[in-house]
């Protein structure tokens, strides 16, 4: 489904009786760019989604709100078009204080549906409740449970449109996760053989509700890609909100949508007597039970996890000791009991679990590992606690930690004064030393006649007082970020690191701790930069590119080429930081053409990219610090001597080092056990590909077409053909013989160029890409775009100094100008660095399938040696 044409839009307006003023208003939005550019902040991840429906990228300000809306609208046949950040509208309403306010507001989307058009504002479900309190006249809950914005509805009605407030609660996180999982199959159709489709449909006809695991076990030769394709094309059905599609044994398939809800209810209350995550009441506490093969894992609302055999658990259910409860059942646990359980240490909980297990074994008549007297004492303690607090488990807790004199030895006045001094003198931007605060505290105690606490006690209390908020007050938000706890997702939402290989990847640059030398002179040059693309699911390195150039779009382009050359794929979502190269028009256009969703990492939060940041650290410690010329010594310049100077010890050239780094990440690191995975990246990748499917229809051939796809264009993307000069790109003239034709003269054509050789550009004319040659080919061939920009900067500066008009650099002028720049230090250095990288780039492009140019072989000429003139020796 594609975007509406102008004629289709006119017909749509007539069919829905759209007023001319409203139609013109919508048309202006359709033709204009987004009103504003979205940004990532500390609490949100923004980005761009390459929409197949619209044919361009759509902005989103939150990956868990607006992006959810984009996915659902992309698959909704009722949605014809959607435009992000469409325009500004002014709202008029009464603030909570009672005064009137009129803020300007940009809705998230303008959505054109088959029978309506209107603005949509997407909000997190949790924030809407807060907004309803802070802005009661702007956000209001409807009787049906939905939300509305009366001032937004009034403002939209003035231009003939509707206004809706959408909540993230409308969709289950698993539903969005599974939509992402299936995107490869509804963006690029997968061809299913008729025999394979018949196998699946007949199996579902005979066994409705069969799991994916059972279906594939019954048909070993059936690729799982067939199942995903049939689900996407709505030829078979499942509940996308029930389980992740990667969990084959929890995904149940049906032939019609009408069967899905009915069969799901039967499955929950039928064959499995103990459903997953059941809510139970046992020993005065609520528990969640999860069946794992022959055992049941019980997680209490407070306390330690307890495990029973399935047989024993069922026996306790049958005798009524364990009872099933509803999710809304309130907890019977008293606050005092909850407090005791929450303060119990790990050893005390472990001892209580062991004692409880012995009691249960004793009551079943099984063998015990302690004396019967101990069992009887524990049972008596269990009954006493059960009678007193309703929870017998308390009687089994070890009381060793409570032994000793627990009486407070510090007066209340001294404690109160300590808290006051920590608040007013320690948690302040001046960041006073703890010893200075303690001295002030002691002096104040002496003046008031209060006994101060000891210094050791003070430092212990100071450590307990120092929280993330205190660190923020003393050192700022960035310093406090280091002490911020890691986020652990406890609900069923999109996996933080993707749920399959190539679902999510991280792309980032780092300057390596190594000095490289020239392959010609052996003299030290500079520290190289490395660009890594890492698969978040398997931690596998998808691409590694080494260069002397600082981070730029060129490094990202080469990483894309290396990834496709090695794996034949690109990731579905790509996480990048706030670097300027990732916000360039070229980079975002490349992602859109390759159908890659861009996720902007929040600023100043390196942990968000911990997958690739961890790789940087591993590469540095495991490899770079073992090589000659590493820069460990230069980290402490005052201690560095000539014997350990990295520039004196450097021996590695760029070509040799790049080959060894590639070998390390693709052969050594790839087969090392990863602590977060419990297996190697290669094993995790293979396992994930088996579960997700090979998705062979998404393979990208490493061909000239792909290389052309990755080449950058000019700011406008097109150039005009001049009949005598050809085309002008980056200040240079380029020519192709077909430009002589009057049919193309004056036409605007798309253009691309290779950033590592300014001698060629490519113009799209006559249905093909034409390789155009620079008129100054001898001077610019082999020069990179970065070197050429240095030349242009020098040329513009010379023009500015002499107040000359703008002149295009043609062949003679360029040759004369370059002669003057022979001694320019920056240009010479860039030329050296480019020459060092030339071999590596040629190796990457080795498989470029360019058509070979045929040359006529000259006829063989036989040489008669007797006819050669003989000369005397010259004296």
Image (spheres, helix red, strand yellow):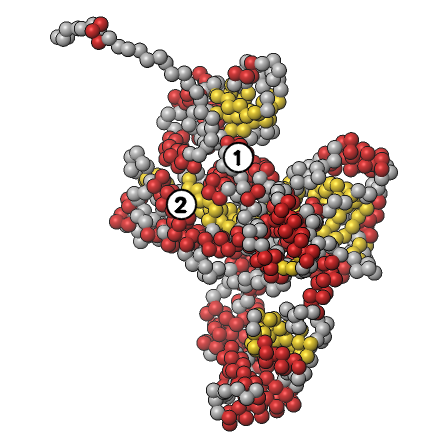
Q: Could you tell me which residue is drawn at 38 percent across and 16 percent down?
A: 857
Give the number of the disc on residue 522. none
Q: Could you tell me which residue is drawn at 44 percent across and 34 percent down?
A: 847
Does residue 91 appear to the left or right of 288 in the view shown?
right
Residue 307 image offset from top left, x and y in percent? 56, 76
Image quadrant in which the N terminus is located = top right
Residue furthest left as drawn = 875
Residue 311 image offset from top left, x and y in percent? 59, 78
Q: Which is more foreground, mark 2 or mark 1?
A: 1
**Camera-nearest residue between 491 and 693:** 693
Work out whether mark 2 precedes mark 1 in sequence or the reverse, and give the earlier one.
2
Residue 467 image offset from top left, x and y in percent? 55, 67
Q: Could you tell me which residue is drawn at 50 percent across and 31 percent down?
A: 704
Residue highlighted by disc 2: 662
Q: Could you tell me which residue is drawn at 46 percent across and 44 percent down?
A: 543
Q: Quadrant of residue 699?
A: top right
Q: Is residue 83 above or below residue 344?
A: above
Image quadrant in which the C terminus is located = top left
Does dot 2 land on a helix, a strand or a loop?
Answer: helix
Residue highlighted by disc 1: 706
């Amino acid at each position: 489904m594609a975007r509406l044409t102008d004629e289709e839009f006119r017909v749509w307006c007539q069919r829905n009786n759209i007023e001319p003023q409203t139609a013109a208003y919508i048309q202006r939005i359709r033709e204009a760019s987004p009103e504003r550019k979205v940004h990532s902040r500390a609490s949100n991840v923004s980005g761009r989604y390459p929409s197949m429906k619209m044919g361009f990228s759509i902005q989103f300000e939150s990956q868990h709100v607006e992006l959810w809306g984009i996915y659902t609208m992309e698959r909704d046949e009722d949605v014809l078009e959607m435009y992000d950040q469409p325009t500004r509208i002014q709202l008029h309403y009464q603030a909570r204080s009672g005064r009137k306010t009129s803020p300007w507001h940009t809705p998230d989307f303008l959505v054109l549906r088959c029978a309506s058009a209107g603005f949509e504002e997407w909000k997190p479900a949790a924030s809407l409740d807060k907004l309803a309190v802070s802005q009661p006249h702007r956000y209001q809950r409807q009787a049906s449970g939905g939300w509305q914005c009366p001032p937004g509805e009034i403002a939209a009605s003035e231009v003939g449109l509707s206004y809706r407030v959408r909540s993230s609660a409308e969709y289950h996180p698993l539903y969005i996760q599974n939509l992402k999982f299936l995107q490869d199959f509804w963006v690029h159709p997968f061809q299913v053989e008729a025999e394979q489709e018949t196998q699946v449909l007949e199996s579902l006809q005979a066994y409705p509700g069969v799991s994916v695991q059972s279906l594939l076990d019954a048909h070993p030769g059936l690729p799982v890609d067939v199942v995903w394709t049939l689900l996407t094309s709505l030829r078979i059905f499942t509940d996308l909100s029930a389980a992740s599609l990667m969990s084959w044994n929890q995904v149940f398939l049906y032939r019609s949508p009408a069967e899905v809800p009915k069969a799901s209810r039967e499955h929950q209350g039928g064959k499995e007597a103990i459903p997953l995550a059941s809510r139970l009441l046992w020993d005065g506490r609520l528990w969640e039970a999860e069946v794992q093969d022959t055992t049941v894992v019980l997680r209490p609302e407070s306390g330690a996890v307890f495990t029973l055999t399935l047989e024993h658990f069922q026996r306790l259910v049958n005798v009524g000791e364990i009872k099933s409860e509803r999710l809304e059942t309130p907890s019977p646990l008293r606050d005092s009991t909850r407090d005791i359980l929450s303060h119990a240490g790990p050893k005390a909980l472990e001892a209580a679990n062991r004692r409880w297990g012995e009691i249960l074994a004793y009551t079943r008549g099984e063998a015990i590992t302690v004396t019967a007297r101990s069992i009887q004492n524990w049972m008596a303690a269990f009954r006493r606690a059960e009678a007193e607090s309703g929870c017998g488990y308390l009687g089994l807790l070890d009381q060793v930690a409570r032994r000793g004199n627990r009486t407070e030895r510090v007066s209340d006045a001294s404690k109160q004064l300590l808290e006051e001094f920590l608040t007013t003198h320690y948690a302040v931007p001046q960041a006073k030393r703890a010893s200075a605060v303690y001295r002030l505290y002691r002096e104040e105690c002496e003046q008031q006649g209060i006994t101060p606490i000891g210094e050791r006690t003070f430092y212990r209390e100071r450590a307990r007082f120092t929280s993330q908020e205190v660190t923020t007050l003393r050192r700022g938000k960035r310093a406090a970020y280091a002490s911020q706890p890691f986020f652990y997702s406890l609900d069923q939402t999109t996996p933080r690191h993707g749920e399959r290989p190539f679902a999510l990847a991280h792309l980032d640059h780092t300057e390596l701790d190594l000095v490289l030398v020239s392959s010609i002179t052996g003299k030290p040059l500079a520290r190289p930069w490395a660009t890594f693309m890492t698969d978040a699911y398997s931690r596998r390195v998808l691409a590694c590119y080494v260069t002397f150039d600082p981070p730029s779009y060129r490094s990202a382009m080469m990483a894309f080429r290396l990834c496709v050359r090695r794996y034949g794929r690109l990731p579905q979502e790509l996480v990048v930081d706030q670097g300027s190269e990732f916000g360039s028009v070229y980079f975002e256009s490349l992602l859109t053409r390759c159908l890659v969703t861009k996720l902007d990492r929040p600023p100043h939060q390196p942990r968000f990219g911990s997958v690739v940041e961890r790789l940087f650290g591993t590469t540095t410690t495991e490899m770079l610090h073992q090589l000659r010329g590493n820069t460990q010594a230069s980290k402490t310049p005052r201690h560095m001597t000539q014997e350990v100077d990295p520039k004196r010890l450097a021996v590695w050239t760029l070509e040799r080092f790049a080959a060894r780094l590639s070998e390390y990440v693709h052969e050594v690191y790839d087969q090392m056990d990863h602590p977060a995975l419990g297996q190697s990246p290669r094993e995790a990748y293979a396992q994930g590909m088996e579960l997700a499917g090979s998705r062979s229809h998404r393979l990208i051939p490493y061909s000239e077409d792909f290389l052309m796809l990755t080449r950058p264009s000019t700011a406008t993307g097109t150039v005009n053909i001049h009949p005598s000069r050809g085309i002008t790109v980056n200040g240079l003239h380029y020519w192709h013989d077909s430009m002589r034709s009057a049919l193309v003269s004056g036409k605007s054509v798309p253009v691309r160029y290779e950033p590592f050789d300014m001698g060629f550009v490519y113009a799209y004319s006559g249905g093909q890409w034409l390789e155009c040659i620079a008129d100054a080919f001898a001077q610019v061939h082999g020069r990179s775009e970065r070197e050429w920009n240095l030349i242009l900067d020098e040329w513009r500066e010379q023009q500015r100094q002499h107040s000359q008009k703008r002149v295009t650099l043609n062949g003679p002028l360029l040759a004369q100008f370059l002669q003057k720049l022979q001694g320019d230090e920056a240009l010479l250095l860039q030329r050296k660095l480019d020459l060092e990288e030339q071999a590596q780039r040629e190796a990457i492009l080795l498989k470029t399938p360019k058509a070979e140019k045929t040359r006529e072989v000259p006829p063989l000429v036989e040489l008669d040696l007797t006819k050669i003139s003989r000369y005397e020796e010259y004296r």
